[in-house]
């Protein structure tokens, strides 16, 4: 018997990031994701040019959003990419200030880099997510990723239980998500915010020898398992009796 529809208040939006191939865009769309991300940061192994991103984005049907990820990009580079993808949402993942984000003139998300350590080292101040949300109140959402060396997706999971109990923002949970842990992440973080989305990259990539992944090369099976795990979390939050998906 089919479960009842998931209420909108508990429906978790899904973004697959770091796409580089047509077949991966098609797999994400077929799985029912809400957004796909293209990395505009040249040092990233998942980088694509704005021209390539526009080419891939033309495969998207209505109501699936293209997202452009920037890291400390120049205003000219942002404007050039926006001209090629006029409906794309922007994601700022570097040292951008609130003013820099607004200058782009587009709806945007701002990444917050959450420390991996449970306590600040050497007397440093703890990361204040509530203040960060207030500083970037013009953002459509705040994306939570683990703070590691370098920029872009970390592939690391921070301690979700240390997030503030109440954050007055739409949040996007990222950093080390996989089909195996995303259900737990949603159950822990969703009650702390207005709405929750999830963003995955390495967690749905094809496995490489040694436990790493082929960066930018997605697995259709992993994408589908990831989406199923997200929907299982939504059903649990809605009070439905569900069987969790297996990988």
Image: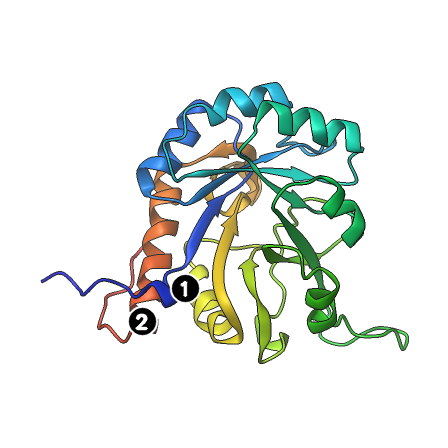
Q: Position of residue 22 (x, y in %)?
A: 44, 23
Locate residue 201, reporting x and y percent: 53, 44
Q: Residue at x 80, y 50 (%)?
A: 99
Q: Quadrant of residue 219?
A: top left
Residue depicted at 32% across the width and 53% down the height:
228
Q: Earlier in the sequence, mark 2 or mark 1?
A: 1
Dot 1: few (<14), some (14–19), or many (≥20) neighbours within 10 Å?
A: many
Q: Dot 2: within a 10 Å radius of its alpha carbon, few (fewer than 14), some, or many (20 or more) residues?
A: some
Q: Are dots 2 and 1 in contact, CB under 8 Å?
A: yes
Q: At 50% from the left edge and 69% from the top edge, which residue is drawn? A: 194
Q: Depth check: 125 or 106 in front?
A: 106
Residue for badge 2: 236
Q: Looking at the image, is mark 2 or mark 1 nearer the viewer?
A: 2
- Looking at the picture, the colour scheme in use is rainbow
**Most distant residue in the left direction:** 1
Q: Secondary structure at mark 1?
A: helix
Image coordinates for residue 42, horizontal then vertical, percent: 73, 29
Quadrant containing the N terminus is bottom left
Q: How many marks?
A: 2
Residue at the outermost bottom position = 165
Residue position marked by numbered label 1 in the rendering: 183
Question: Going by the image, does 222 lie left or right of 195?
Answer: left
Q: Is residue 96 visible?
A: no
3, 139: nearer the viewer? 139
Going 22% across and 73% down the picture, which residue do you hit? 241
User: Between residues 225 and 14, which one lies in front from this camera angle?
Assistant: 14
The image shows residue 34 at horizontal and vertical percentages of: 41, 45
Circle 2 — which element? helix
């Amino acid at each position: 018997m089919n479960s009842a529809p998931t209420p909108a208040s508990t429906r978790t939006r899904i973004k697959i990031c770091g796409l580089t191939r047509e077949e991966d865009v098609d797999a994400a769309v077929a799985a029912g994701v809400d957004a796909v991300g293209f990395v505009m940061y040249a040092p990233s192994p998942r980088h694509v040019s704005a021209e390539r991103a526009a080419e891939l984005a033309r495969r998207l049907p209505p109501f699936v959003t293209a997202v452009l990820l920037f890291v400390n990009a120049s205003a000219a580079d942002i404007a050039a990419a926006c001209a090629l993808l006029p409906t794309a949402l922007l994601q700022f993942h570097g040292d951008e200030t609130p003013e820099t984000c607004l200058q782009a003139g587009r709806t945007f998300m701002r990444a917050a880099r959450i420390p991996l350590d449970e306590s600040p080292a050497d007397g440093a101040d703890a990361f204040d997510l509530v203040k960060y949300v207030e500083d970037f109140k013009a953002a459509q959402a705040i994306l939570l990723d683990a703070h590691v060396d370098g920029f872009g997706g970390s592939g690391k999971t921070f301690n979700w239980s240390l997030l503030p109990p109440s954050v007055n923002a739409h949040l996007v949970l990222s950093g080390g998500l996989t089909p195996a842990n995303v259900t737990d992440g949603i159950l822990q973080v969703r009650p702390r915010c207005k709405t929750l989305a999830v963003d995955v990259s390495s967690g749905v990539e094809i496995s490489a020898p040694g436990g790493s992944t082929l960066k930018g090369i997605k697995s259709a099976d992993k994408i589908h398992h990831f989406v199923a795990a997200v929907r299982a979390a939504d059903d649990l939050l809605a009070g439905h009796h569900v069987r969790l998906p297996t990988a």
